[in-house]
Image: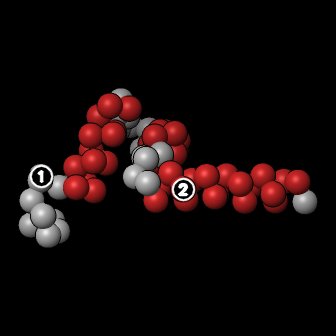
Amino acid sequence: MLGALAQAGRYLGQSMRLMVGLPEYDTYVAHMEKTHPDKPVMSYEEFFRERQQARYGNGKSGGCC
């Protein structure tokens, strides 16, 4: 019961961070280490910039183009 509650809390926290646009750097690092160990891992600053670029683009409004 307590484990399920803790898991629900983690999911809720992750959802809240994603809703306000805070990237999940720890999740990214874990994924890279597990799935792509041969590729370099971006620093937090690089990761944050990349996520901002993906979310907001290059300053143009109205989508990706």
The kind of residue tagged 1 is Asn
Residue under label 2, please give it. 16
Which mark identifies residue 49? none
Would you identify the image quadrant in which residue 56 lies? Answer: bottom left
Would you identify the image quadrant in which residue 48 lies? Answer: top left
Task: Name the residue rendered at 63%, 58% in the picture.
Answer: 12
Residue 40, can we see it?
Answer: no
Helix, strand or loop for disc 2: helix
Residue under label 1, please give it. 58
Left or right for 46, reference 64: right
Give the x, y percent position of residue 13: 61, 52
Give the x, y percent position of residue 55: 27, 56
Give the x, y percent position of residue 7: 74, 55
Residue 42, can we see it?
Answer: yes
Helix, strand or loop for disc 1: loop
The kind of residue tagged 2 is Met
Task: Name the residue rendered at 50%, 51% in the picture.
Answer: 17
Q: CA distance from mark 2 to mark 1?
A: 25 Å
Would you identify the image quadrant in which residue 63 lies? Answer: bottom left
Label 2 environment density (alpha carbons within 10 Å; few <14, some 14–19, many ≥20) = few
Total marks shown come to: 2
Classify 62 as above or below 49.
below
Label 1 environment density (alpha carbons within 10 Å; few <14, some 14–19, many ≥20) = few
